[in-house]
């Protein structure tokens, strides 16, 4: 890793601009889940200990650029972060033309996406952000896949551009999982559609020993194996892709285990009764909404023997308790495994929290799209510019 690490710098009396991912859910003016805020605190604390004055940037939601909308204000995040830090976090609405910050102070600036040119990585805006600081710290892995002014452009023009503690930890964890994994390596890819994760599936087939598919993706694979799927979500136009992926897997000696049983309902509803069925007994009225207990026993054995586990996506509609057993069984099996385990993606983290296994995983990634793109083998622009600056 050629990038500079913030932990290696002398930050005393320096103005330090940190791009974090504080894009958290807010209900009735209060933060309802602070996982990402807690993950960001290590870098803030390290910079404070180093004697820096800290200016924090983040986005929240998807507001229209140039239009101030209180729905997307970061002010509640500033209040919540102050409580967690045990010190004042000053909130600044008008910051782009400069803010006064002293050593030991923490400032959170209003949503970067209110700034015109943020998403377009506007050069003028990037230079203005860079002028705020002596040191720019990229610490938002969750936005590292986006080349935007506050993630990429500012790193080009800041006097020093470096990686924060969270970003370094994320990259090291993903590196451990993908660059030199302990075998057997297992990847779980869930989700509603093959189309959204086709690139990921193609990349993983060449890297893993077991590729487990869940959710609507599994339905398409079942259809590709000529099993009835009833009214289930199936991408019929991608059945040929599913067949091709299975052929490639066979050539690569990668196992894609197929379920022998599934859990069906007659409607996508919290009130729909669940029925365990053989994959060959799914009726025309059935919707496959979870994978069955027989298949989960097979997964339990795979997780027990695994050396590395990467999890992205649930096995079924775990939000409805009657269709949550597959995902819960998988979660428990990963938690009980001695493998190096990493989980990422919004639905996956929600499942981790629901089934209370966070303390039993090796690492939980804060990234959604960035986690996915890293697994797809793509270059993350915000990481690439840090590496470029690190080799200057």
Image (cartoon, rainbow, N blue to C red):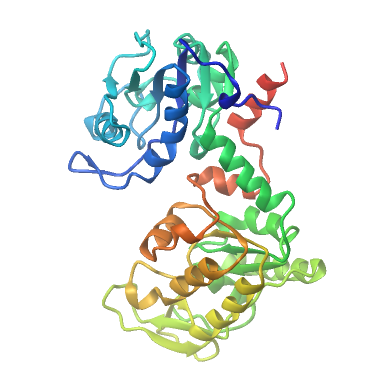
Vertical comparison of 30 with 163: above or below: below
Q: Is residue 340 left or right of residue 75?
A: right
- Residue at image coords 51%, 80%: 229
Residue 226, position as x, y percentages in the image: 62, 82
Q: Quadrant of the N terminus?
A: top right
Quarter of the rendering containing residue 252: bottom right
Vertical comparison of 341 with 38: above or below: below
Residue 209, position as x, y percentages in the image: 72, 66
Quarter of the rendering containing residue 334: bottom right
Q: Observer-nearest residue: 32 or 122? A: 32
Residue 334 visible at all? yes
- Residue at image coords 39%, 31%: 59
Total residue callouts: 0
Vertical comparison of 148 with 280: above or below: above
Q: Is residue 161 left or right of residue 267?
A: right
Residue 118 visible at all? no
- Residue at image coords 49%, 47%: 368
Q: Residue furthest left?
A: 28
Residue 94, position as x, y percentages in the image: 29, 14
Residue 212, position as x, y percentages in the image: 61, 69
Q: Observer-nearest residue: 64 or 237? A: 64
Q: Quadrant of the C terminus?
A: top right
Q: Residue furthest front?
A: 49
- Residue at image coords 42%, 29%: 45
Q: Observer-nearest residue: 313 or 7? A: 7
């Amino acid at each position: 890793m050629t990038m500079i690490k913030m932990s290696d710098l002398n930050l005393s009396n320096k103005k330090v601009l940190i791009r974090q991912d504080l894009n958290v859910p807010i209900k009735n003016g209060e933060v309802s889940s602070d996982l990402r805020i807690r993950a960001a605190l290590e870098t803030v604390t390290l910079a404070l200990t180093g004697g820096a004055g800290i200016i924090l940037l983040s986005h929240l939601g998807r507001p229209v650029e140039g239009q101030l909308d209180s729905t997307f204000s970061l002010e509640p995040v500033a209040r919540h972060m102050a409580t967690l830090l045990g010190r004042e976090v000053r909130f600044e609405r008008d910051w782009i033309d400069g803010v006064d910050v002293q050593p030991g102070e923490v400032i959170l600036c209003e949503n970067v996406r209110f700034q015109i040119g943020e998403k377009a990585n506007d050069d003028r805006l990037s230079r203005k952000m860079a002028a705020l600081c002596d040191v720019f710290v990229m610490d938002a892995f969750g936005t590292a896949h986006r080349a935007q002014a506050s993630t990429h452009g500012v790193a080009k023009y800041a006097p020093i551009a470096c990686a924060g503690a969270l970003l370094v930890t994320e990259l090291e964890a993903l590196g451990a999982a993908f660059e030199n994994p302990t075998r057997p390596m297992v990847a779980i890819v869930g989700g509603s559609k093959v189309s959204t994760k086709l690139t990921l599936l193609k990349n993983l087939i060449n890297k893993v020993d077991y590729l487990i598919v869940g959710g609507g993706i599994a339905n398409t694979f079942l259809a590709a194996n000529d099993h009835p799927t009833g009214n289930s979500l199936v991408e019929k136009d991608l059945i040929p892709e599913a067949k091709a992926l299975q052929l490639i897997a066979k050539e690569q000696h990668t196992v894609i285990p197929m379920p022998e049983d599934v859990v069906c309902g007659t409607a996508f509803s919290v009130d729909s009764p669940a029925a365990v069925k053989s994959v060959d007994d799914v009726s025309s009225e059935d919707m496959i909404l979870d994978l069955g207990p027989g298949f989960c026993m097979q997964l339990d054995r795979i997780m027990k023997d695994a050396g590395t586990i990467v999890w992205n996506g649930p096995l079924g509609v775990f939000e409805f308790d009657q269709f949550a057993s597959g995902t819960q069984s998988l979660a428990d099996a990963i938690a009980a495994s001695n493998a190096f385990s990493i989980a990422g993606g919004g639905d996956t983290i929600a499942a981790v929290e629901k089934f209370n296994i966070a303390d039993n995983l090796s690492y939980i990634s804060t990234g959604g799209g960035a986690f996915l793109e890293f697994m797809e083998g793509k270059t993350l622009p915000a990481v690439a510019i840090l590496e470029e600056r690190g080799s200057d």
